[in-house]
Structure formats: C-alpha cells, structure tokens
Amino acid sequence: MGEISLELVDLVLLGLQLGSWARFEADVERGVALEALGLPEVPRDEVRAWATRFRYGHRLVAAAEFSAWLEARSVTVTELAAAISRALLREREVARTLEQSAPDSAGLLWVEAVLHGILRDLAREAGDRLAAASRVNAEALPAPDPEVVETLVERALRLPMPGVSGLGDVELRARLTRLDRLSGALNELRDQVADEQHVADWLASHVLDWLQIEGEEMALATEGAAREARLLLVEDGLALADTAERARTEVHHRRVTLGIAPAEATAALIGTSADEVAGPWHESDHWRLMLVRRKSPPSADDPVIRERATRELMREVLDRTLAGRIGWPQPL
C-alpha cells in the first residue's frame, strides 16, 4: 500500500459526512456566543487544572515539551487558555438558552480542533478507511447516492474554512465521492472479517477474557464485615437476603465480564462455580461478595458479544495494515 498521505481538507470533509464536524462547530459557536455575553469569567485555577490534565493526557510533562507541542501546531498558550475557558463556560452554562447568534468563530476553529482533538480522531477514521480500501476494491462498490453527495457539497461550500469552501463544487464532489467509497470499503471489509468462522475462532481464543459471571452481590464498608457475611452464607447457610439484612446492606444483581472487570474481582470470581460464594474483594471503596448464579462462555449468538468480536477483529486487521504507513501533513 505504501505510505498514506492524508490532507486536512479530507479530514474535515469526512467529519462532515460523519456528522462530527457539525457538532464540533456548534460547540465552538456556543462557546463564542457565551463568551460574548460578558458572563463572569471562569476562575483561572480551573483553566490551569484543565490545562494540566490536557498536558498529562498528551504526555507533555515538561513545560518545554508542552511549548514545543503547541509551537508545532501554531497555537499559543494564550489561545489555548482562551479555548479552555470557552469549554469550561459551555460546561457551566449548559442550561442557558442563547437567543442571539454567535460572533464569527471561523478564526478559532483550528485552536479548538487542537484542544478537542477532532482532527486526530478523524485522522484515525480516515486511516481505517484507507486501510480497508487497500484490501477491498473500493471502485467496484456501488456509487454513492448523488443527492447525498450534492447535499454535502452544498454544506461544504458554506463551511467557514477557505481551505474547504475554496476548492469549489467540482473538487469537493470528487473528494466526497471518494470518501463515500472508502467508507463503503470499510463496511465491506467488516462483512468479510465478521464471517462465522472468523468470529468463532476469535471467541475460542478469548474464552476466559469474555467469560460472563452473573450473580447476586453485596457491598460492605469493611473487610471484617464482608468476611463475617461470608461466614454466615457459607458456614451457617443463612439466606442471602437475611445476610444482607443483618449486614445492613442490599443485594444487587450483577453481570461481570472477566476481561474488563477490575483485577481484584477477576481473581475472586474466576475459580468459582454456580451456587458458590466469591470474595470478599475490594472494589470502588467497598468490600464485595457475590453468590454466583451462572457462568456463561462467549457465544456468537449474543449480539453484544458478536459486535465486540467484530470490532476487535477489525481493529487487528486495520492496525496490521496501517503499521508504519500513515503520514500526517502536519501535527494534529
């Protein structure tokens, strides 16, 4: 497949197709409109806290690393702080109704895109589609609906971004048609990957990870209370409801998938059988016991399990295809 080069305009157009770009622009416009109302400013310590989370989320621990990262994206600290303030303002004023239109926000789209990572997310979406197209003949797929393409062209021509609207309707139509075919290639690859045999083989290799355990669970404040409740259940044969009443807690039904459960829960549950008591284990500030009712291996007949298997199969195929082959036009 060689190296793939993605253009920013294609990422915006893909976002337009997926609907994510319209949602992003609406959020930006709302933030700008709220800012224009002259509301009380967001406290600086809240802006600094957000900026710190942003830095650590991008693994930019040192100040010099953070500065270099921003410089590579042509964003200043002041611009980023203003975008963070608008984001916090949207959170604080989520219930406020806006009657006036927002000031022009076109000049803020880039810094907002950097802050919220929409172009990075769209780059991943585009990369997946290009990878699929290298394995599926996208040109052989049905042509997109012309009316849908024309609607997207009209919307693209109205976007407040010269790099997009300036392309003109002919070029936009060609790019949007290509993107539609790439999305079709992704769907076609998904159908191929998710056939009965592939899914069955995947499930067979993930039995323990996807094993589901159901039962009735109690959460207690201390380890001592949990161990005492276990003795009442196991040694004294007290009913679950009566044990919960004595412990002044409640019983809740719970289903646990081992592969995504907390490590403590997995360790306690993996060796138990139906009608046995598992625990206690510590999870989310409580000590927990479960009377196991059922252990169910993964089945392709379960639509949730099948969907998860399909996603993981697709991710493996796409990552293997993309390895080392994506070239970014500039840092996102």
Image (cartoon, rainbow, N blue to C red):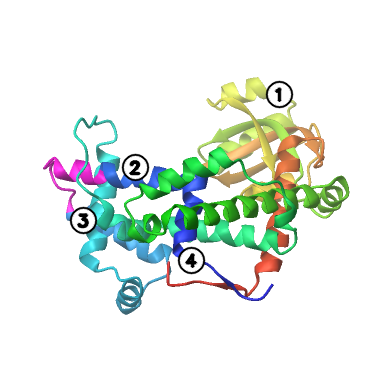
CA separation in Å, label 4 and label 1: 67 Å
Q: Which mark is residue 26?
A: 2
Counting residues from the N terminus, which is met first, the one under dot 3 or under dot 1?
3
Q: Residues within 10 Å of mark 1 (few under 14, many from 20)?
A: some
Element at label 3: helix
Indicate whether 109 appears above or below 302: below
Magenta stretch in the rendered image: 31-43
The residues tagged by marks 1 and 2 sit, at their Cα atoms, a distance apart of: 58 Å
- Mark toward the viewer: 1 or 2: 2
Residue placed most toward the observer, 194 or 56: 194
Q: CA distance from mark 4 to mark 2?
A: 23 Å
Foreground label between 4 and 2: 4
CA separation in Å, label 3 and label 2: 26 Å
Residue occupied by mark 4: 7
Q: Nearer the viewer, residue 44 or 74?
A: 74
- In the rendered image of this protein, does residue 51 appear above or below residue 28? below
Q: Are marks 4 and 1 in contact (CB under 8 Å)?
A: no
Spot occupied by residue 209 in the image (x, y as percentages of width and height): 74, 51
Q: Which residue is mark 3?
A: 45
Determine crowd level at label 4: few under 14, some 14-19, many 20+ residues with C-alpha closer than 10 A. Answer: some
Q: Amino acid at mark 4?
A: Glu
Mark nearer the N terminus (1 vs 2): 2
| Residue behind mark 1 | 238
